[in-house]
Amino acid sequence: MSATLTIASAARLLDEHHLLREIIHDGRWTLDAEQVPGAHEAIPAITYDTRTVTPGSLLFVKGRFRDEFLDGIDGRGLAAYVAEADHSDRTRAVGLIVDDAHQAMSLLSAEFYGRPQDRLTVVGITGTKGKTTTAYLAHAILNDYSDGHAALFSSEQTCLDGHTYVQSKLTTPESLDAFRMMRQAVDQGMRYLVMEVSSQAYKVHRVHGLTFDVGAFLNISPDHISPIEHPTFEDYFRCKRQIVRNSRTLVLGADCAHRGLIEQDAAAAGVDVSLFDFRPDGAADADGTGAAAAGDRRALVETRIDPGNPAGFRMAVDGRDLGSFELTMPGAFNIVNAAAAVAIAVRAGVPADDPAVRAIERVQVPGRMERIVGGDNLLVYVDFAHNYLSCKTLVDEIVRVYGARNPRITLVAGSTGGKAIDRREGIVRGALGRAESFYFTLDDPNFEDPREIAEQMRSYVTDPNAETHVIVPRERAIEAAIADARAHADRFNIVLLIGKGHELRNIIDGRPVPYEGDAVIARRALGVAG
């Protein structure tokens, strides 16, 4: 690490960012850190967990913190704490009292770890759907281009050394963890970092003070609307839009809803915008709003279905045709994600004609459009689709690819408890009128009754010709859906297992409960090898 954090330098940084209210120590309230004993001693450790405090630590007091967590903390050597309230009744440690503890933690964590972001080309990707797939695709290009020197923070996996992937806990890590991992990545020689940026990351300031070399705004539609997430779509969108002014250059979907407002944000912040676009036939949208529309500027990256290969697509960068591509993950929406990833890579410095761009053809994101063949008349897809837009897009693609075979579509889905309540109706609407059979089941119900969630989803099925079933144990629901498909062997059947992707747990009563995974259960039910 190239910087040393002290109480004095921490106070100075917080004051520069207009966060510091006062410093409290031994009954004295001041703004002058020089009055505090040990103000210039190096802080050896930072944490937001009182259980990990060691001698000389700086503690961030945030979130659902209870005063009793500080009992006995002086005996473990706490040097200072950053909080939005005075805790001198519980500890003799120096208190740095701030307006926002999350913002303070992000700024001070970056400083403690020597501002590792300055040693990386950092890519931040936001949007309602496609973040994870786009992150994997962009990471593949940058990793190939840099000979394995690209890191990844995604909702699925984290990679800090270019080749080792571990399960992630959050879409966007807590700021302290993010900067710690950036430091590890830099120390292991990484030159690039690709990270997903959730709406919550901005709402609770996990990326406060971080400027992305390349920001990407894929798309926007209502999601994560609940009492514990975003009260309204406006609040959700407002949080997402913060990536614009915190990027040096922005990659934007040509078909993104409210694109005009995002471009106004960018103009106000002096941020250059590059569009990426997908046209199945190379034409503009019916309403003329696409990048190919007359009078609109050309997209940096343009893609369209390859007329010579329905499973492939052609791509052009700055008007130059790069030829035909084919992804391991089918779907028009994944072509859009590929266009975004290439636009990101080009803006990050990868030449459009570099062989590394072809790395997108080798990417398989766990639990994204994972196809399992159960016979000539039965296909099962495992996908993370978990809201209206992602479900509708998935079903749209199934109809586009297989519509000529008049498929009998079965949807197996649940929805989370305690948050994103609007997803329950949205998932159903995304498949309504096209799915002939619905199986509603368990998916992270948390403290809610999973049967009540499933019955609520069932109530949104207004198609009188659609069959509906409620089977709470997810394993049984998947087995029943596959058995039902086999019972209709006179039809071409497609079973869509959505919501979990490759997740191996369900959150029930506040605790993670191990789960085999949709793909494992489906393969067993089909009698096919894993």
Image: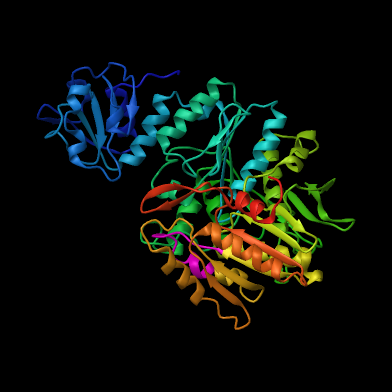
- Residue 382 occupies quadrant: bottom right
Q: Is residue 12 left or right of residue 154?
A: left
Q: Residue at x 62, y 70 (%)?
A: 431
For the C terminus, which image quadrant?
top right
- Residue 336 lies, in percent from the top left, at 70, 54
Residue 404, how many percent across, how many down?
Answer: 81, 70
Q: Is residue 296 visible?
A: no
In the rendered image, residue 254, in percent from the top left (x then y), is placed at: 67, 57
**Residue at the bottom extreme, as displayed:** 464
Residue 157 x/y as whole percent: 56, 39
Magenta residues, dominant SS class = loop
Q: Quick check: 373 above or below 105?
A: below
Was residue 142 drawn as part of the magenta stretch in this picture?
no
64 or 517, which lies in front?
517
Q: Is residue 272 above or below residue 229?
A: above
Question: What is the basis of the colouring in this image?
Answer: rainbow
- Identify the image quadrant of residue 409: bottom right
| Left or right relative to 61: residue 281 | right
Q: Is residue 516 left or right of residue 90?
A: right
- The residue under the point 24% across, 41% down is 84
Can residue 463 be seen here? The reply is yes
Quadrant where the N terminus is found in the figure: top left
Q: What segment is highlighted magenta in the picture? A: 413-426
| Total numbered circles | 0
Residue 387 location, quadrant: bottom right
Residue occupying the point 44% across, 46% down: 201
* Foreground residue among 239 and 159: 159
Hey, which residue is sitting farthest left in the picture? 27
Q: Is residue 338 left or right of residue 512?
A: right
